[in-house]
Image (cartoon, rainbow, N blue to C red):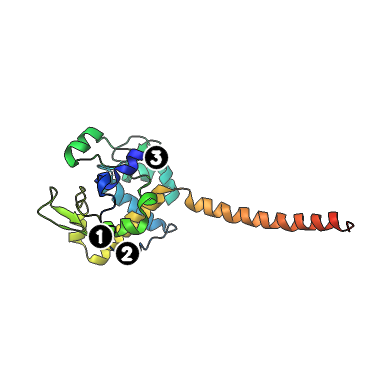
Amino acid sequence: MRKLLAALLFAPATLLAAGAGHPLDEAPIDPRDLVSLQAGARTFVNYCLNCHGAQYMRYNRLTDLGLTEAQIKDNLMFAADKVGETMSVALSVKDGKAWWGVPPPDLSVISRSRGADWLYTYLRTFYRDGKTPTGWNNKTFPNVAMPHVLWKLQGESSAVEYDRTVRDLVNFLVYLGEPAAQSRKAIGIVVLFVLGVLFVFAYAMKKAYWKDVR
């Protein structure tokens, strides 16, 4: 896990604090928006999963997003044969380090370590820079080794459409960081309600038990 966090977004550990002064835009995500999450999953497998893995997520867990296993297998599985497999990539650590200086990090918990606002801003602040090996740089993360993998989408669509694509992708990455978040919150509400009911009974028992004690 330490190696995973140290290699976040193709960056050496010494660069993790770079760009900390850049203002972050609020990510307009909604973890209950299944259409957004499905679109984000599609962008993730088409543009991110080539280099980045999500080794703590299994494809069949995407049924949480309202997809059937058949839909997952037909539309989202390009690097696996069974829906029970994890979302890993064939790119080796050695090759990744040779090509970019550091191996591409696993993105399973990137939203929890970086935050949705950081990811949303980061993916929208790439710019051309002929002085870098990739030809790209980033205002949020200066000198990051990762190229702008979504540049074609940004060039072919309007700013609003591209922002929506990034929103959907970040929404999915947030889901990826904690797939059970929504069910956990729902269970938490039920637990609090039950505890409230139990408190009423416990208080009534306490009054009945101590009523004759002076």
Say which label, 2 or 1, has the lower sequence index.
Answer: 2
Badge 1 is on which residue?
Answer: 124
Question: Residue at image x 57%, y 53%?
Answer: 188
Q: Where, by quadrant of the figure, is residue 21 drawn?
A: bottom left
**Which quarter of the rendered picture does the N terminus lie within?**
top left
Say which label, 3 or 1, has the lower sequence index.
Answer: 3
Question: Residue at image x 28%, y 40%?
Answer: 78
Question: Horizontal placement of 207 versus 61: left or right?
Answer: right
User: Between marks 2 and 3, how big is the CA–CA gap?
Assistant: 28 Å
Q: Amino acid at mark 1?
A: Arg
- Report if the CB atoms under discs 2 and 1 are less than 8 Å apart: yes
Residue 68 visible? The answer is no
Q: Secondary structure at mark 2?
A: loop
Looking at the rendered image, the disc whose residue lies closer to the viewer, 2 or 1, is 2
Q: How many marks?
A: 3
Q: Secondary structure at mark 1?
A: loop
Comparing 76 with 187, the one in front is 187
Question: Residue at image x 22%, y 33%?
Answer: 94
Where in the figure is residue 197, as x and y percent of width and height? 70, 57
Comparing 156 with 130, the one in front is 130
Q: Amino acid at mark 3?
A: Tyr
Badge 3 is on which residue?
Answer: 56
Badge 2 is on which residue?
Answer: 25
Circle 3 Cα neighbour tier, 10 Å, few/some/many (<14 / 14–19 / ≥20): some
Where in the figure is residue 130, as x and y percent of width and height? 9, 54
Label at residue 36: none
